[in-house]
Amino acid sequence: MEFQQKRSAIEERLSSKFPGLIPPGDMHRLFRLARDPQSLLHGEIERWRMLLRHLDEVSAEAARQKYPQKWRKRMLQRALHDFFVGDLGMYAGGPDDFDDNYREWRNACRDVEDLYAYLLGYLPKELHGGLRLPEEVAEERNPIRLIELVRSGGFTRSPWVRHCARLKLILGQAFFEYRRNGFASEYLEERAEQLRKRLERHLFKRKSKKRVRIVAQLDHTDSNRCIGYEFIEDPSISVLETDSICVIEVDQYIIENDRGEQTRVMFSIRPKRFPVLKGLVKDIRFVQLANIGDGVAMMFIVESEPDLDRVVDKVRSVLVRAPGSVCDQSSNLGHRAGRKVDTGNSHSSDAFQVMKYNALVQDLVVEVQFTPVVTLVDNMRRTDRAHADYKARQYCESVMEIFFPSSLTHINWPSDFQLQDGEYQPQNHPETWDKIKAHIRQWHVQQKL
């Protein structure tokens, strides 16, 4: 049908997941998309119309009763909450849960603000001026006020204000949902810390933890390949990072197996920051439908493949002892070298060498990774194979147009990346990619990506 043939790539992705975030672009074309009575976009527009009519009725009644402004806002907030809850709504509970849900909603808005700032970090500062959230939207966590901004565009009737307010409303709702399913950032941080302490009690040798630096020598003639390294435990020894020296600070532990053999291992654990961002990248809307369950990631870094085998075996006996508690295992180390770990991901590189699996640990899905020191350094320092480059490519193709649509920001986002002469290059707008790439190569080393 005609309306289906008119969709751009970004509209095709969003129209079935987050139709309210379709960039404005050609409004005539979007109008044709919305005319299809069987489309999600048409249905979403009707749902918003019903909600807005309901709020307008409540607002009119409050005005007729001459309620103070504070009462009016409270009535509208509760009306919004009750509209979503209803008998079949998405939020569990009833009207009595208003205070808890409203508190969680405000936290969800804060999540959106954090995500917005995180994405700006991937972009050079010369672009930030036109991309920052408007003051009216930046710290606004009242859903009624955000709806008003979507409808009015604020004091200046700005399309950018309308877009940012709409983005915060729709993604705030998604963050709310993820929070209610156990993906609140503060909850995941707490669980990650609990897991760290558990492993320090049951896996690592008691009191073996040390903060050390890995000082790696790089061959700058071969994509910064690691050609050797040493461990420095003395914090008074100063080592400067250069083009030929890479310095990585890690927590070092000792693992002892049943035969008394000791293995030095570097260990890190972190909560996943933005599950909703992963959902946007992978076209996932509801967390219940998602293969997105890993809320925490841990990594064991060893010195050799024999060490890796011993560590994998010991971790198996402590962390994931029960049958059926591990899935999605893959590796490209040793005789498996040359494979992609994530074959279904076009952005994944076979240069990222790791063994990994997902494990169910105390009802929490954890991504567990194992890698040698040399490949860790290579993964961090190889220019176009660095994790920051990988994420930036993903975001340029999947997310930037959603947050910063070209029709409003006048920035053409690079897309359709292809591997050319060992580097991923966009087939569209390479000039923008050159600016982003130059920025993230200075930035990503300092970030916890």
Image: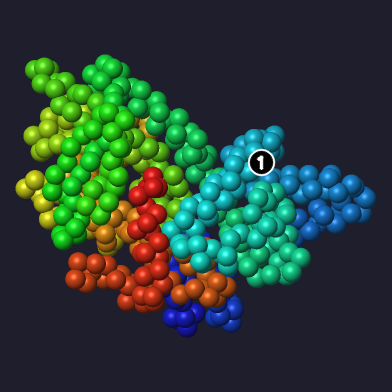
The residue depicted at 16 percent of the width and 20 percent of the height is 256
Residue for badge 1: 102
User: Residue 163, image x and y in percent?
Assistant: 61, 65
- Picture colour scheme: rainbow
Instruction: Give residue 156's quadrant in the image.
Output: bottom right
305 vs 33: above or below: above
Picture quarter with the N terminus? bottom left
The residue depicted at 36 percent of the width and 27 percent of the height is 195
Q: Please give left or right for residue 12 compared with residue 49 in the image.
A: left
271 vs 57: above or below: above
The residue depicted at 81 percent of the width and 57 percent of the height is 57
Instruction: Give residue 169's quadrant in the image.
Output: bottom right
User: Residue 448, image x and y in percent?
Assistant: 39, 45
Quick check: can you spot residue 66? yes
220 vs 70: above or below: below
Closer to the camera, 384 or 173? Answer: 384
Instruction: Give residue 170's quadrant in the image.
Output: bottom right
Closer to the camera, 231 or 2? Answer: 231
User: Residue 371, image x and y in percent?
Assistant: 19, 41
Numbered disc 1: secondary structure? helix
